[in-house]
Image: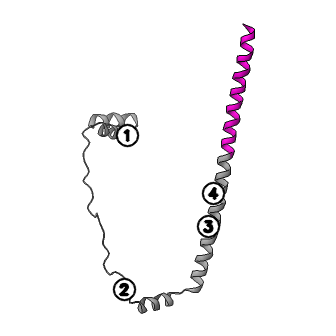
Amino acid sequence: MKHIIIPILAVFIFLASFLYLHQKVLIYVEAYKLSKNHHIYNELVDKRDYLVYNFTKETSVSKVNQWAEKNKFIPAEKVLALNLRRAPVHKSRYTFASLVNGLLGIPAGSSTALANEQQ
């Protein structure tokens, strides 16, 4: 019996340590990818800031106005707003559930949302 337990224990310890090492490697790989993406993001932000700085130094409001007059650019005088009506507020059919949720301190949206989803 002892001859069987020792190899099984050794295999179990090996598998546990192998899985632990595998998880550590995966964490380091993800950290490397994250740092690489962060570095690329910082480079792009620096380029954007450089372009914005150059744009603001070389263009002025008068130049933009001259361009607008030259190209006969006319801004829209009317602003369209869509969906100005508010959606009607529906009374909950689950008033008992809302009452119980209010007494227990549970947000009411969760149970009524689940009830609406089941319909």
What's under tag 1, amino acid-wise?
Answer: Ser
Q: Position of residue 13 (x, y in %)?
A: 72, 24
**Circle nearer the viewer, 4 or 2:** 4
Q: Earlier in the sequence, mark 4 or mark 2?
A: 4
Residue holding disc 4: 37
Asked if 108 appears above or below 55 in the picture, the reply is above
The numbered mark, 3 or 4, whose residue comes first in the sequence reads 4
The answer to whether mark 3 and mark 4 are in CB contact below 8 A is no
Write down the residue under mark 2.
Answer: 74
What residue did someone put label 3 on? 44
Q: Amino acid at mark 3?
A: Leu
Whole-number angstrom distance, CA of label 1 to CA of label 2: 49 Å
Residue placed at 66% from the left, 43% from the top? Answer: 27
What residue appears at the point 26 percent right and 42 percent down from the top-left corner? Answer: 92
Alpha-carbon distance for marks 1 and 3? 41 Å
Residue at x-position 50% and y-position 90%: 63
- Of the two numbered discs 1 and 2 on the same chain, state the one appearing first in sequence: 2
Decide: marks 1, 3 in contact (CB < 8 A)? no
Image quarter hosting the C terminus = top left
Q: Which of the two discs, 1 and 3, sits closer to the camera?
A: 3
Residue to which mark 1 is pinned: 110
- Residue 1, image x, y percentages: 72, 7
Residues at marks 2 and 3 touching, judged by CB atoms closer than 8 Å: no
